[in-house]
């Protein structure tokens, strides 16, 4: 997301790629209003809106252009609980067979309700690649397929 353009310019640029009309943009902005009042920030430069607002603007663009492939890099990082839940619910609700969502995160327990396939990378190597059974303990899967972590106690005892 380019920091030195306005929110509305960014939205219009993304919409133009998909030939989405200004009237459709306006309708989408109105429909998205309960999530983010884009009208109130549309003339602000992206660099001047909060991290949470940036994530919600990205979510709006996804809602508007409906891409086939959607990548989320740490979608809930630096957000309050309300916005974390909102984004996760929006992702879960938006998931269709027509789109592929890729969520990259260290916060595995937060996304456990929305994922259906897990790939774990550890030191640049794929150590796990399988369908996720929601009955499984995602934290246990992660621990079993990553290098053993050092504990604070081990560090303190070695001093």
Image (tube, grey):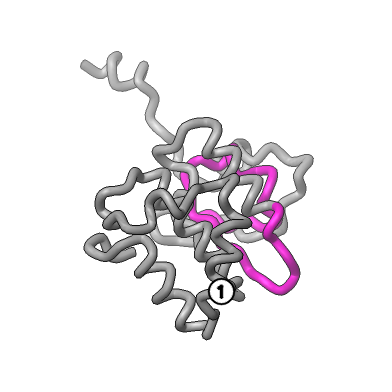
Residue 130: image location, x then y, percent? 68, 59
Determine whether the residue tagged by mark 1 lies in a helix, strand or loop. Answer: helix
**Depth check: 85 or 41 in front?**
41
Q: Judge from the rendering whether residue 145 lies leftward or rightward of residue 17; answer left or right.
A: right
Identify which residue is drawn at 48% across, 43% down: 76
User: Crowding near pointer 1: few (<14 within 10 Å), some, many (20+)?
Assistant: few
Image coordinates of residue 85 in percent, x first then y, are 60, 38
Is residue 104 within the magenta segment? yes
Which sits in the foreground, 79 or 126?
Answer: 79
Q: Quadrant of the N terminus?
A: bottom left
Place residue 63 in its image quadrant: bottom right
Quadrant location of the C terminus? Answer: top left
What is the total number of numbered labels drawn onto the structure image? 1
Q: Is residue 90 left or right of residue 159?
A: right
The vertical placement of 150 against 25, above or below, is above
User: Is 110 colored magenta in this rendering?
Assistant: yes
Q: Identify the residue under disc 1.
A: 23
Q: Position of residue 93 (x, y in %)?
A: 71, 53
Span shown in magenta: 93-120
The residue depicted at 35 percent of the width and 20 percent of the height is: 152
Image point (76%, 49%), residue name? 133
Q: Is residue 67 left or right of residue 115?
A: left
């Amino acid at each position: 997301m380019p920091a030195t353009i306005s929110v509305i310019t960014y939205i219009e640029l993304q919409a133009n790629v998909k030939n989405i009309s200004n009237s459709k943009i306006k309708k989408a902005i109105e429909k998205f209003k309960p999530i983010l009042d884009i009208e109130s920030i549309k003339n602000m430069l992206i660099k001047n809106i909060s991290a949470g607002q940036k994530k919600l603007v990205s979510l709006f663009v996804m809602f508007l252009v409906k891409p086939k492939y959607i990548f989320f890099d740490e979608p809930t990082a630096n957000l309050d609980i309300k916005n974390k839940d909102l984004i996760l619910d929006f992702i879960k609700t938006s998931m269709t067979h027509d789109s592929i969502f890729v969520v990259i995160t260290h916060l595995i327990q937060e996304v456990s309700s929305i994922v259906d396939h897990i790939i774990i990378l550890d030191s640049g190597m794929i150590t796990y690649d399988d369908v996720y059974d929601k009955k499984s303990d995602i934290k246990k899967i992660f621990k079993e397929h990553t290098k053993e972590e050092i504990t604070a106690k081990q560090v303190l005892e070695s001093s």
